[in-house]
Image (cartoon, rainbow, N blue to C red):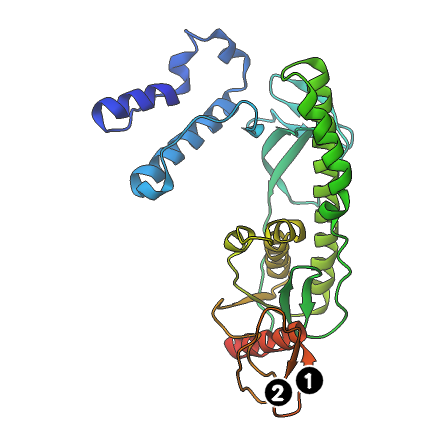
Amino acid sequence: MLAEKIAHYEATGKMLRCWPSQYKAHYPWLQEVDSSALIGAYNALEAAYNNFFRNRKAGYPKFKSKRKGHNSFTTKKTNGNIELTDTVLKLPNLGMIKVKKHRQIPEGFQMKSVTISLTSSGKYFASILYEYDKRISLIEPEKVIGLDFSMTELFVPSEGIVPDYPRPYRNTLVKLAKEQRKLSRRDRGGSNYNKQKRKVARIHEHVTNQRKDFLHKQSRQITNVYDAVCIEDLNMKGMSQTRGFGKSVSDNGWGIFTRMLEYKLFEQGKQLVKIGKWYPSSKKCSKCGKTKELLLSDRIYSCDCGLVLDRDHNAAINIRNEGIRLLA
């Protein structure tokens, strides 16, 4: 479908309308696939084209990479074609599949769709989308905390203890480099190459799981204690491209952490307040409000009013105070 759309666009400059059913006569294997999965792929392609014609900055739709693409498909529940028990998941055209259920589904939840994905390490996952009714009312924030981004410790809070970030990627660099060197010596496409490739993928997966586990626990602890969390709206992509900061920024997962905070706070009627990235949180005195210029190497903030404080802790207090002002 994408190939024909590209050819039609190059010839006419317009979008071609086509449907999955047209191709089943020429490609019999499409009849073996669940129709809902085909419609899901069709909807994704249509959405990509609509985004392109609405805003050319979105980029022209292109083919997925066979090697680097994310292998997955989504199918919708219709007429009981999908069922889930404690040990088995029933899928269209695939039948009963043994599963390890991650959590119990509460009463009143309605299943909408299932996305099956294959990781680089060879593991299959089924992500099930449910719909449920829940009234969320905002609570009046009483306990507010400010978090200042930190390269080494993830964040420095305005109050409390600085988390001991495990740095999973940094701690695995030696082992990862060793296995990647072995992979570079293998013949691409061979059985030994594929085995070593999965081994490298398992290391990356383990690092990702360690990072997410830590971020989930930290975001849950903060959400359960505070009514509002104040952070800076940082450009993480730009920071990751800065020389010498790329690995540290990618390792701590600040972007993932803030998204976790946002949805967990929202579920409890709490708020995540984002401060403008140009707010001088590090340059401003949290006691008297005066500002002064600092070098990146200056780790202690000292003011004429007598305040002597860790630079990041001072910034976290300023972020909290600005967040309280915005909430008011």
Going from N to C along the chain, the mark reached first, 1 or 2, is 2
Q: Where, by quadrant of the figure, is residue 230 drawn?
A: bottom right
Q: Is residue 293 above or below residue 272?
A: below
- Write the residue at 37% across / 20% down: 3
SS at mark 2?
Answer: loop
- Image quadrant holding the N terminus, namely top left
**Image x and y of residue 39, in percent:** 46, 25
- Write the residue at 60% across / 24% down: 81
User: Which three-letter amino acid code belongs to the residue tagged 1?
Assistant: Val
Marker count (numbered): 2
Is residue 324 found left or right of 160 in the rendered image?
Answer: left
In this view of the protein, can residue 103 be seen by the observer? no
Give the camera-side residue of 152 and 270.
152
- Write the residue at 69% across / 19% down: 186
Q: Residues within 10 Å of mark 1 (few under 14, many from 20)?
A: few
Give the camera-side residue of 46 and 131.
46
Measure the C-alpha gap from mark 1 to mark 2.
7 Å
**Image x and y of residue 255, in percent:** 59, 54
- Write the residue at 48% across / 7% down: 28
**Image x and y of residue 161, in percent:** 77, 69
Q: Tell me the tag on residue 303.
A: 2
Residue under label 1, please give it.
308
